Image: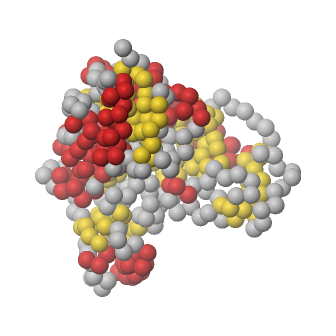
């Protein structure tokens, strides 16, 4: 009898790897999410709910699936809003899962920081509250510090405060634009940013590798690029692995893929955990690792719930160097896009511009307003960087103030 995997959210990589592992895959999705015809053809069935974070509504669909198929083997989510619901229903059905409290710890940055206070390696000063709970003329912690939404993601509404005037400016703006958001304030860590991609099974952990992150820097720190492998020095890599394993153990993570964001503190000469997620990273990061090592975090993540031998996977000694670069364009109307000359290279794995000709381009203020991406993979970091640069130099983008397209540019 075929095993049944219920996925909360139509993750293409989750679906394809579930099928590859022999599951019949059934999707439960938010009704306002677009699902492509490609995904529709792959899965057994699709059910729609108002919201994936409505545990009762999703559970009703799961009960219907159970009655129809007489079994469910796994209920998983690779999307943020479905994580807690998948955990709750799995627990109720006695299926393997991370406890809901662990999902709460990782989704709520204040709970994560509170948990970390018990460990000297992980603890960090922080402050939490609504804007009205702070004072406009009094700094809530030592400068410089970062302000971000307590349950935010995607580099959205992240601010760096360097002096009292910036605090006052943010305070006034926040009271006007974000009166109902709860914020977390943390010391600004000056140093390079990375993420560590993991898979856990029965409380043991496997590290796929480290990703180097490129951002726009102050004040919003929008992510505009990632590189794998992100660290080549073994001593430095070992420090990243150690802090990651410590955080996974302190948090009590049992199963599935993980994405842990870290920064190297230049002042203290140590790594600091910034965020933790019980899901794969976004921004094509799992794909970069597959290009570099041949290992798929989604496949390992699904297997981890029923096959602990997945952690015996051996990483290759020789890796490709893979990069993604996100494009940002000036505001205006996209009049045309194309290339100086047609040039194909096996190292270019994927590229896209997220606007059609005639669309109005908006200012890049977070991960959701970037304009496009390029993914490359070659035998060295330098070759990948050169290929990215050559691609961008060959790309023509015409932006103007009207919606009339340029006939000389081919899409």
Say whether residue 25 is visible.
yes
Q: Is residue 321 left or right of residue 191?
A: right
Depth order, front residue of 169/100 = 100
Q: In this view, does 73 lie to the left or right of 393?
A: left
- Vertical side of 286 occupied by 312: above or below: above
Depth order, front residue of 182/126 = 182
Task: Estimate the x, y position of residue 317 in percent, counting from the top left.
Answer: 42, 23
Q: Image point 68% across, 62% down: which residue? A: 360
Task: Estimate the x, y position of residue 102 in percent, counting from the top left.
Answer: 23, 45
Q: Image point 67% across, 52% down: which residue? A: 355
Task: Estimate the x, y position of residue 369 in percent, counting from the top left.
Answer: 56, 57
Residue 84, quarter of picture: top left
Q: Image point 47% across, 27% down: which residue? A: 44
Task: Estimate the x, y position of residue 348 in percent, counting from the top left.
Answer: 64, 34
Considering every residue shown, the one lying at the far bottom of the view is 137
Depth order, front residue of 394/33 = 33
Depth order, front residue of 279/326 = 279
Say whether residue 297 is visible.
no
- Vertical side of 175 occupied by 307: above or below: above
């Amino acid at each position: 009898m075929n095993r049944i995997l219920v996925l909360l959210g139509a993750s293409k990589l989750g679906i394809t790897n579930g099928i590859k592992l022999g599951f019949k895959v059934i999707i439960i999705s938010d009704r306002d999410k677009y699902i492509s015809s490609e995904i529709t053809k792959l899965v057994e069935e699709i059910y729609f709910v108002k919201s994936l974070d409505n545990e009762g509504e999703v559970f009703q669909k799961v009960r219907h699936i159970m009655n129809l198929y007489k079994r469910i083997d796994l209920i998983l989510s690779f999307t943020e809003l479905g994580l807690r619901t998948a955990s709750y229903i799995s627990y109720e059905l006695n299926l393997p899962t991370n406890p809901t409290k662990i999902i709460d710890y990782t989704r709520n940055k204040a709970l994560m920081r509170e948990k970390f206070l018990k460990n000297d390696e992980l603890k960090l000063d922080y402050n939490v509250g609504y804007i009205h709970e702070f004072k406009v003329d009094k700094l809530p912690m030592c400068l410089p510090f970062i302000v971000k939404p307590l349950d935010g993601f995607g580099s959205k509404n992240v601010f760096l405060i360097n002096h009292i005037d910036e605090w006052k400016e943010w305070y006034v703006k926040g009271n006007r634009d974000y009166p109902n958001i709860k914020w977390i304030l943390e010391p600004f860590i000056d140093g390079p940013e990375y993420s560590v991609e993991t898979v856990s099974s029965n409380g043991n952990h496997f590290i796929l590798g480290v990703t180097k992150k490129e951002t726009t820097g102050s004040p919003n720190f929008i992510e505009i690029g990632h590189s794998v492998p992100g660290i080549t020095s073994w001593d430095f890599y070992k420090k990243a692995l150690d802090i990651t394993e410590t955080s996974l153990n302190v948090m009590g993570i049992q199963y599935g893929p993980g994405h842990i964001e870290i920064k190297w503190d230049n002042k203290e000469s140590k790594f600091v955990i910034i965020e933790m997620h019980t899901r794969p990273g976004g921004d094509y990061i799992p794909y970069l690792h597959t290009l570099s090592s041949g290992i798929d975090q989604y496949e390992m993540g699904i297997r981890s719930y029923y096959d602990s031998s997945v952690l015996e996977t051996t990483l290759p000694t020789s890796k490709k160097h893979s990069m993604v670069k996100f494009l940002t364009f000036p505001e205006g109307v996209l009049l045309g896009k194309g290339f100086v000359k047609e040039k194909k290279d096996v190292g270019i794995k994927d590229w896209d511009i997220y606007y059609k000709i005639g669309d109005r381009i908006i200012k890049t203020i977070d991960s959701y307003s970037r304009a496009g991406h390029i993914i490359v993979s070659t035998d060295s970091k330098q070759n990948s960087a050169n290929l990215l640069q050559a691609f961008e130099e060959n790309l023509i983008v015409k932006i103007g103030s009207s919606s009339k397209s340029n006939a000389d540019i081919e899409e």
